[in-house]
Image (tube, helix red, strand yellow):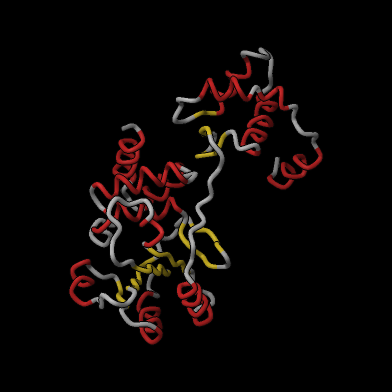
Amino acid sequence: MTKDSFVYLLKIYKPINTRKLNIKDFKLRFKKAPVISLEDIVQFYKVFENKVKKSTVKWRVHALVEKGIIQRIGRGKYRLGKHKEFEPYISEDNTKLYQELKLEFPFLDICIWSTQWIGQWMLHVPGTFETIIEVEKDSEENVFYFVSELRSNVFIHPEREIINRYAKSNEPIIIIKNLVTGSPLQINNDVQIPTIEKIIVNLIVNKELFSTYQGRDLDSILTNAFEYNTINEDKLFRYAQRRKKGVEVERLIHRIKNR
């Protein structure tokens, strides 16, 4: 079944009888489960209807998601709770900067984000934040020169020592770096930004650049990110593997979630 035909069927099917969802028992059964698989849900409903079809259970899963009883965290993986979309506030300055970049480089894949978005999850909030602009490989230099004409405090592939030494403390810091192919991205108010999965992996992998966000602060960021947002772990680990850090990222996420 194609995605379009599935959506069409959703429109014409009658709503599922809420009583058949057994929501109270469902919550009780899975209240301590960090991950709920589709097979777990199938077995749950078989307690009430021994011959229930898997296709029927899939419709019930869809209804549970729509009602905010469960949220998808991966392919065939769920957890209790309503889906919480990552929708950070994009400043007017960064919105304008992104628009200027797209006007100058209309065919270039670009994303922009601010480390200020993760400050809310930290134990010790930094006094300054950086705007990160990621662009396709081999275009960084052209973008750097263009942005430098518009703003000051612009750095390309900088080491943290360079930023600490030369950045003006009273002005926003802008960092230009390479956009890894296959990066998970999303559109927010017509601005392309990284998904929360990409930001998490970047913080873990780019330890030197994001040295401010390591140690206990990284633990706090990850703990709060998973608590207050719906995170697709399959997407997160796929991107970590593209960064050749799959094992390291998976081990850290597992430790944070099972403390």
- Residue at 78% x, 42% y: name it: 11
Image position of 194 with respect to 135: above or below? above
Image position of 144 with respect to 187: above or below? below
Which of the 4 quarters of the picture holds residue 209?
bottom left
Task: Indicate the position of residue 143 as horizontal and vertical percent values.
Answer: 40, 78
The foreground one among 124 and 12 is 124
Task: Indicate the position of residue 13 as horizontal and vertical percent values.
Answer: 79, 36
- The quadrant of the picture occupied by the N terminus is top right
Task: Indicate the position of residue 83 as horizontal and vertical percent values.
Answer: 55, 43
The foreground one among 131 and 74 is 131
Image position of 176 with respect to 104: above or below? above
The foreground one among 28 and 190 is 28
**Left or right: 150 in relation to 251:** right
**Left or right: 70 in relation to 158:** right
Image position of 73 with respect to 193: above or below? above
- Residue at 50% x, 80% y: name it: 100
- The quadrant of the picture occupied by the C terminus is top left
The foreground one among 224 and 238 is 224
**Count of numbered marks:** 0
- Residue at 74% x, 44% y: name it: 5
Which of the 4 quarters of the picture holds residue 39?
top right
- Residue at 52% x, 28% y: name it: 37
